[in-house]
């Protein structure tokens, strides 16, 4: 912003575009991972990220760096992020929250290490040289991608739907073949069938059929609203610290505190959630709510110590919901559909981040301070949590009601079957008693023989 002499709103486009596109690439990265492999997609994402960062070092204006850093780095990061996170869900069934928390420690380490490192690189090499060094560091994504060992799960497929679809396609093809009179009409019919099949294949790979689940749709609405405000503190916290007299070195320490607490909470949350058997979705919502409240409190801080305290609490909340986002998605869609479900979740967050930080930047340009920006972000986050909690309660209530009705129906059927069995047993008992009474009225064989012998005498 200082080098190109641009406003906060225009500069926010660079950061928000990078974050938003990296998240919006989630469904595409998931589809490519399902089609090819998680390893290859992660490797390609690392190459694109490194090359884009290197080219960004030679940006002549803010528009160029918005394309190279905002768009291209976002594409590379998105291709590497989704398959890496989804692989953890494929490997772990029990203690998944712990495993994903350990994997999420990398984000905290990055905030802890890279914040002062980037400040040092900018002071020593300038912003252009810092981009070149970070481009070399980004090549480690390729090495990490090569270490992802493939694992294949048995897919749950609705055979009836696929069989019905195949029958419809075959009937349509047969009907079309009977109707056509020319080769041109036949080709047009086959093209339409091919387009229809391609459309269904793309929808299946992107996971769009998951929106038929009510809880998944509610989770996506939560992700969209959450995306409006989640990155506003990270983008504007340093500038606000400058406005209240906090030095740049103290701002780097403040970000390091955020990274440390995020790293610690990402690991410990897994043990707490798994061993206490807490609800994943409610734990995720509680962490988001805490982060939203801290965002609302930031305008009330007026010195370095108070901002460090708020950033530490935000780091705890960020570590918890960053680790539980994919865990909550797995709890809704299952491990087989996790890659597609998590990709869609990232897409909704990215769609919100494409608009939220830019809106916050323009609010600063209009008001002259960052208070309105933080209030806007905090309200969006809290609104997303309320929708998630209310939606989960409604869905759980309907599910429990259906289970209760099913149980009552089975109880009625069981009582009817028992009543039929008792009636059958009673009829059988009465019949046997009648038979016994008739046999008791007839004389025994010995008595008949005695009577015959006496009469002969």
Image: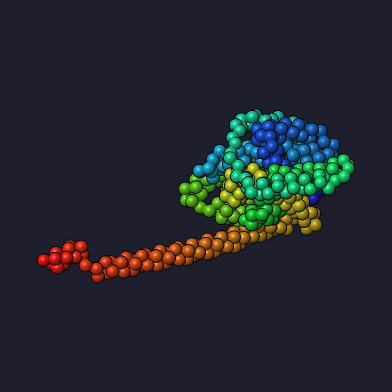
- Quarter of the image holding residue 392? bottom right
**In this view of the protein, can residue 371 be seen by the observer?**
no
Residue at position x 72%, y 55% from top? 373
Residue 121 x %, y %: 71, 33
Residue 431 sits in quarter: bottom left
Q: How many marks?
A: 0
For this orientation, the residue located farthest to the front is 456
For the C terminus, the quadrant is bottom left
**Relative height, residue 295 to residue 82 (above, below):** below
Residue located at (66% from left, 45% from top):
340
Residue at left 77%, top 38%?
72
Q: Quadrant of the N terminus?
A: top right
Could you tell me which residue is drawn at 58 percent across and 39 percent down?
153
The one nearer the camera, 320 or 32, is 32
The x and y percentages for residue 333 are 61, 49
Residue situated furthest left in the rendering: 457
Residue 256 at x, y = what percent? 62, 42
In depth, the one of 385 and 421 nearer the eye is 421
**Colouring convention used in this rendered image of the protein:** rainbow
Q: Describe residue 68's horizontal placement relative to residue 319 as left or right.
A: right
Is 284 located above or below residue 103 in the figure? Answer: below
Nearest to the observer: residue 3 or residue 267? 267
Which residue occupies the foreground of this view, 421 or 327? 421
Residue 67 location, x and y as percent?
Answer: 81, 40
State whether residue 156 appears in this view: yes
């Amino acid at each position: 912003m200082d080098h190109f002499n641009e406003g906060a709103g225009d500069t926010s486009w660079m950061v928000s575009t990078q974050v938003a596109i990296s998240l919006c690439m989630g469904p595409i990265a998931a589809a490519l991972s399902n089609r090819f492999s998680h390893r290859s997609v992660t490797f390609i994402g690392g190459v694109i990220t490194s090359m884009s960062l290197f080219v960004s070092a030679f940006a002549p204006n803010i528009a160029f760096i918005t394309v190279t850093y905002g768009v291209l780095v976002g594409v590379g990061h998105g291709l590497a992020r989704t398959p890496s996170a989804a692989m953890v869900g494929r490997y772990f069934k029990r203690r998944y929250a712990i495993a994903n928390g350990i994997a999420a420690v990398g984000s905290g380490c990055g905030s802890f290490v890279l914040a002062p490192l980037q400040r040092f690189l900018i002071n020593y090499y300038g912003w252009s040289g810092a981009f070149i060094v970070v481009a070399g560091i980004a090549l480690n994504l390729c090495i990490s991608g090569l270490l992802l060992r493939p694992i294949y799960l048995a897919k749950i497929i609705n055979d009836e739907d696929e069989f019905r679809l195949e029958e419809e396609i075959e009937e349509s093809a047969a009907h079309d073949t009977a109707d056509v009179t020319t080769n041109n009409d036949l080709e047009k019919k086959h093209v339409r069938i091919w387009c229809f099949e391609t459309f269904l294949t793309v929808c299946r790979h992107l996971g769009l059929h998951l929106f038929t689940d009510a809880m998944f749709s509610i989770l996506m609405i939560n992700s969209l609203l959450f995306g409006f405000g989640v990155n506003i503190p990270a983008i504007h916290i340093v500038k606000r610290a400058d406005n209240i007299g906090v030095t740049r070195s103290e701002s780097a320490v403040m970000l390091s505190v955020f990274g440390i607490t995020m790293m610690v909470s990402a690991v410990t949350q897994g043990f707490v959630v798994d061993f206490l058997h807490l609800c994943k979705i409610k734990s995720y919502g509680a962490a988001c709510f805490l982060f939203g409240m801290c965002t609302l409190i930031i305008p009330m801080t007026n010195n370095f110590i108070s901002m460090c305290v708020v950033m530490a609490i935000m780091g705890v909340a960020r570590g918890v919901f960053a680790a539980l986002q994919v865990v909550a998605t797995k709890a809704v869609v299952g491990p087989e559909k996790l890659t597609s479900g998590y990709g869609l979740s990232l897409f909704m967050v990215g769609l919100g981040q494409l608009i939220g930080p830019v809106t916050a930047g323009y609010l600063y340009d209009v008001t002259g301070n960052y208070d309105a920006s933080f209030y806007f972000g905090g309200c969006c986050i809290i609104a997303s949590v309320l929708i998630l909690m209310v939606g989960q309660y409604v869905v759980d209530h309907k599910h429990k009601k259906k289970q209760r009705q099913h149980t009552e129906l089975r109880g009625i059927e069981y009582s009817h079957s028992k009543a039929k069995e008792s009636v059958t047993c009673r009829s059988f008992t009465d019949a046997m008693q009648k038979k016994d009474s008739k046999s008791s009225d007839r004389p025994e064989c010995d008595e008949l023989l005695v009577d015959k012998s006496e009469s002969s005498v």
